[in-house]
Image: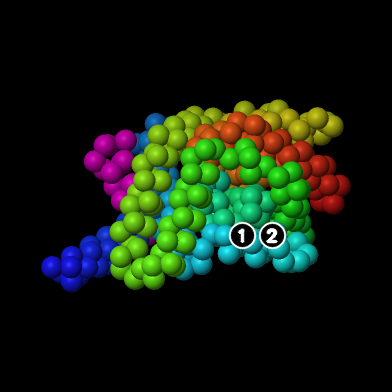
Amino acid sequence: MEKNKKIRLLLTIFTVLPVLLVLYYFLQQLTDIFTYDLLGLNPDSRLGASVNFFFYDTIKILILLFLISSLMGVVNAYFPVERLSNFLTSHKLYGLQYLSASLFGAITPFCSCSSIPLFIGFVKGGIPLGVTFAFLITSPLVNEVAVAMFLGMFGLKATLVYAISGVLLGTVGGYILGCFRLERYLSPWVREIQEQAGQESVFWEKEETPFIERLPYILADSWNIVRKVLIYVLIGIAIGAVMHGYVPENFFAAWLSADKWYAVPLAVIMAVPMYANAAGIVPVIQVFVAKGVPLGTAIAFMMAVVGLSLPEATLLKKVMTWKLIGIFFGTITLFIIALGYVFNFLL
């Protein structure tokens, strides 16, 4: 009987996971069909763009959250939380852990909200908060698609400045935030899943529990994480969808076109309510530059849009207290403003 139960479990897993992966791969096409064909919305209308954006990003983030949480659960099962945490905190890595996390963020094609599932997985896996922040900062700022578009629109020099500064921002920002010892400002829910993951790892190691018996608990924990952050995902993406569909780019260009000293901080502050990925905002930056906005100011605006957004803050509320969100946003805002002035000087 036990053998049949294990076989059914394996069949379920090897059926569900491929379905989720296929759904993720074809998600944009399926969302377009649902929004424009079934609901009959106009793809060129603001309502159509907002609804399409909402369904696509919500489903994408929930799938990512489940898959990444499951993967981190498997990692925790065989490499206990305490062991990983002790390694990263007790060994002299000379800051390479922050650079590595930042580079990993640069090669992952995620927007700020899509990075949250990996952030939760890292925290659950016992990775120090500063290292996790290094990933969270860089992941939305830099990716290969945005770099390629940037190269074609603005040339090699601007692309190198943008990409290198994004990685350095994550590295330095993660290091500084790590020095603040901010773990006490994580939400009680995160501390609870960290403690639970550690207890399960110790128990499984002691009892030498086979993987097939661990898997149902790992998947159940992952589903529980998805269930508990669902409302935050829905609220965050709804805010982003409204901003995506209804805030015209000309509104920002009109305020930022003048070459004034306050243009850079104003660009960063105005960008926070927006929400887009780096590849999606690069064409908008091209429009800004064509309308007279300095390139450095435009890049600062782009970084703030993709790295600091109200939807991201809403999602982070499940894993951080408002104080920690304020420290994170405030620190990165100051960095981006400083980079904006540097960009204008160099470019």
Nearer-the-camera pick, 88 or 229: 88
Quadrant position of residue 294? top right
Image vertical order of residue 124 relative to residue 261, above or below? below
User: Disc 1 on helix, strand or loop?
Assistant: helix
**Tag 2 near tag 1, CB within 8 Å:** yes
Q: Is residue 3 visible?
A: yes
Q: Which residue is mark 2?
A: 89
Position of 188 with respect to 322 (left or right) is: left
Predominant SS along the magenta part: helix
From the viewer's perspective, is 161 left or right of 22? right
Relative to 266, residue 82 above or below: below
Magenta stretch bounds: 24-41
Mark 2 closeness class: few <14, some 14–19, many ≥20 residues within 10 Å? few
Residue 278 position within the rendered picture, expressed as x and y whole percent measured from the top left:
59, 50
Residue 289 in which image quadrant: top right
Q: Is residue 240 visible?
A: no
Q: Position of residue 122 (x, y in %)?
A: 55, 55
The residue positioned farthest toward the front in the image shown: 206
Quarter of the image where one finds residue 300: top right
Residue underneath mark 1: 85
